[in-house]
Image: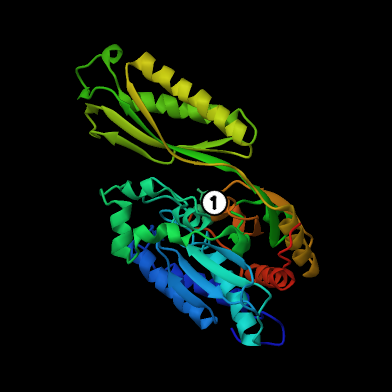
Amino acid sequence: MSLASEPLAGAGAWIKAMVDGWAGYSEDEEHLTRLFLSPQHKACAQAVMSAMRAAGMTARLDAIGNVVGRYEAAAPGAKTLITGSHIDTVRDAGAYDGNLGVALPIACIAELDARGQRLPYAIEVIAFGDEEGVRFPTTLSGSRSIAGTFDPAVLSVTDAEGVRLRDALTAFGCDPDAIAGEARRRETVAAFVEVHIEQGPVLEVEGLPVGTVTAINGASRFAITVEGMAGHAGTVPMHLRRDALAGAAEMIAAIEARAAAENGLVATVGRLAVAPGAINVIPGKAEFSLDIRAPEDLQRQAAVTVLEATLAAIARRRGLALRVERLYDEPAAACHPGLMAQLDGAIARQGLRPLRLPSGAGHDAMALAALCPIAMLFVRCGGGISHNPLESITAEDAEVAARVFLDFLEHFDPDLG
Ligand code: GLV
Ligand code: MN
Ligand code: MN
């Protein structure tokens, strides 16, 4: 991207090409899977650092595996506006979830740098490493470290291969004992503003390329283990069985029914493992994940309490042992009214209708809410599809979003009132 008559001309194609290039850093060629602290994550982090440096920023890998790019303020001692998003992905992911929110601010800073323009505040672009929580039974560890809420006990969790988070960090080139030092001092940070694809259909339906997020749903995640008795599929009469999978299936149906009955509540069982897993063996053990979200924390907590009781009752009736382990709890996060107004202002100055919408998906901004005011700019994605290889954006939308974000940066007033 070069200086052109129109600011950011060609930036949409540049952003898309950058993200599409990063999509090559994947565990397998056919599908995009880039998990926290994997070799593919390392290669992508290096590519992100190169892009940041080419855009006139300094770039480093921090103690928890975040890439931190920095564009200094016009004068020393100014506050920092943090932006960025994540570069880890789900399995068989789309390319733009998270990654757009890293590439787009880099394009904006490249434009500022090409003009030789500094702003009255410093900008950090952070490529967080652990937003999806796919590899380890923890999530948001990168953004929590920046916010100063990372729990060092989490360093002992292990992935499916038994690798401890602490050891994976060391192998990645990070120093787990330095994580506490990554926490930002509150008085030095003006705000966190994340750009992200919407991952839903609202902007497409409204015919708008961007929108201002009002709040992010809270989420709880669980690992659930159901144990019964493995046995011969041919010899044990139905009424004498303690089938762990049949019990888990009843639980999953109850979870779905509960969420479907309540406005705003969503619950997902995304993973199920059955042991021993043979066609002629009654399942002795079933393990599944549960992810519950709602816009209101009280609503989510009430649903969790009811579901825990429901699952326990099903287990009791079927003579099954039940273990429910809570992996993660993140409260709903409201976006700052002053920041939302500033984003709306940038959208309007670009000749677009400002639209406000909530976020059903989780984001690094949730963790940053513990540190500073947060806001998010959503970008339209094709069909509202995400967490799917069909995820798409257009270069035109990426360019409009970059113009809105640059406009926001140029007018940003850290005095949020
Ligand atoms: C992250 O994408 C999440 O909302 O699970
Ligand atoms: Mn995601
Ligand atoms: Mn995301």
Q: Residues within 10 Å of mark 1 (few under 14, many from 20)?
A: many
Q: Is residue 332 above or below residue 237?
A: below
Q: Is residue 138 above or below residue 5?
A: above
Between residue 270 and residue 385, name the one nearer to us: 270
Name the image quarter holding residue 125: bottom right
What residue sits right under mark 1 in the picture?
367
Between residue 366 and residue 35, name the one nearer to us: 366
Q: Amino acid at mark 1?
A: Ala
Circle 1: element type: helix
Color scheme of the displayed model: rainbow
User: Image point 54% across, 73% down: which residue?
Assistant: 70
Between residue 416 and residue 357, name the one nearer to us: 416
Q: Which quarter of the rendered picture does the C terminus lie within? A: bottom right
Q: Is residue 196 visible?
A: yes
Q: Is residue 61 above or below residue 307?
A: below
Q: Is residue 207 visible?
A: no
Q: Which quarter of the rendered picture does the N terminus lie within? A: bottom right
Name the image quarter holding residue 129: bottom left
Coordinates of residue 355 in the picture (x, y in percent): 75, 55
User: Image point 59% across, 76% down: which residue?
Assistant: 107
User: Image point 67% across, 51% down: which residue?
Assistant: 335
